[in-house]
Amino acid sequence: MEKPKAYKLLAQQEGISNSEAKSLIDRGLVYVGNNKVMIARGEISPKTIFIVQKVEKVRPIFEDDNLIVVDKPSFVNSDEIERQFKGTQLLHRLDRETSGVLMLVKNEEFRIKAIDEFKKDKVYKEYVAWVDGIVSEPMVINQPLFTEKKGNKAYTKVSKKGKPAITEVTPLEVSAKKTKVQLVIHHGRTHQIRAHMKFVQHPIIGDESYGGHPSKRVMLHAKKVTLLGQTFEAPEPKIFAHFGS
């Protein structure tokens, strides 16, 4: 008997279209037990019971004539949020599984001014993450980063031919063989934190592309941003507090 493809079986179980089911798997939201379903077109036993992780709603933090700031949930693409808020443009991006402060601009004049602040490294960007291993003392990772794009995917590594990048790492809490850290970044290169933490052998938990242990999500959250004298903050998701216990 032929086994069904994962996305088709999921569509039947959830009463949704095949394309919606495929999208849920591609986003990393579908599990069998504790194992993430990785391949939508993979064949699977017809008796499989799926668990679908729910996506939280986008929560606005701040709005004025220039800017909308939101708390982006994990598993949502930054571009989707731009489409949700008509007439806005992303000022920066967060990776799909990274949550936290995301800023969208409403007019070109403010966008140019804000981008200039980013270019001059005048924007304060603070993240929090759970990483593999024990980080016992603060460190500054000053390593150039080079990004290669293959298809739609980017991969960044430390390389002499890369661009300057600095990440300040401060341990906040140690639990078993993992550490919660505060990360302040300068420059803000593609996958900067992910590549730098892999380089120092403390990859982010859930970030399997960069060597992290599997988890329900990449444990990285953009907590605080200060731009042109205004500070925006997104509280840590509940999973971050419970993760150490």
Image (spheres, rainbow, N blue to C red):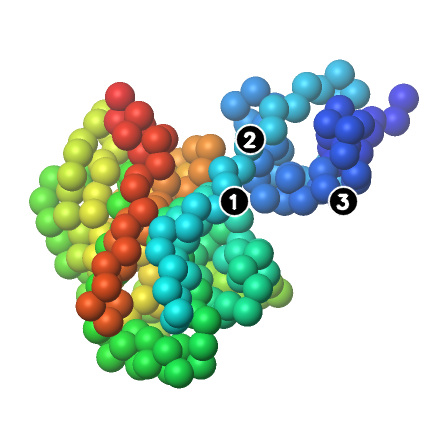
229 up-or-down from 47: above or below: below
Identify the amino acid type marked 2.
Gln
Question: What residue is disc 1 on?
Answer: 75
Q: Which mark is residue 53?
A: 2
Kind of element beneath mark 3: helix
Give the residue at the far left of this rendering. 137
Q: Is residue 207 visible?
A: no
The residue under the point 16% across, 39% down is 172
Who comes first in sequence, dot 3 or dot 1? Answer: 3
Image quarter where the C terminus lies is top left
- CA–CA distance between discs 3 and 1? 17 Å
Kind of element beneath mark 2: loop
180 up-or-down from 191: above or below: above
Q: Are marks 1 and 2 in contact (CB under 8 Å)?
A: yes
Residue 61 appears at what percent x and percent y?
36, 51
Residue 235: image quadrant is top left
Who comes first in sequence, dot 1 or dot 2? Answer: 2
Dot 1: few (<14), some (14–19), or many (≥20) neighbours within 10 Å? many
219 up-or-down from 44: above or below: below
Q: Are marks 3 and 2 in contact (CB under 8 Å)?
A: no
Image quarter where the N terminus lies is top right
In front of the other: 229 or 168: 229
The residue under the point 23% across, 25% down is 176
The residue under the point 11% across, 49% down is 138
- CA–CA distance between discs 3 and 2? 17 Å
Residue 105 appears at what percent x and percent y?
43, 70
235 displayed left or right of 18: left
Q: Which mark is residue 63?
A: none
Question: What residue is disc 3 on?
Answer: 19
- CA–CA distance between discs 1 and 2? 10 Å
Identify the amino acid type marked 3.
Ser
Residue 224 appears at what percent x and percent y?
26, 53
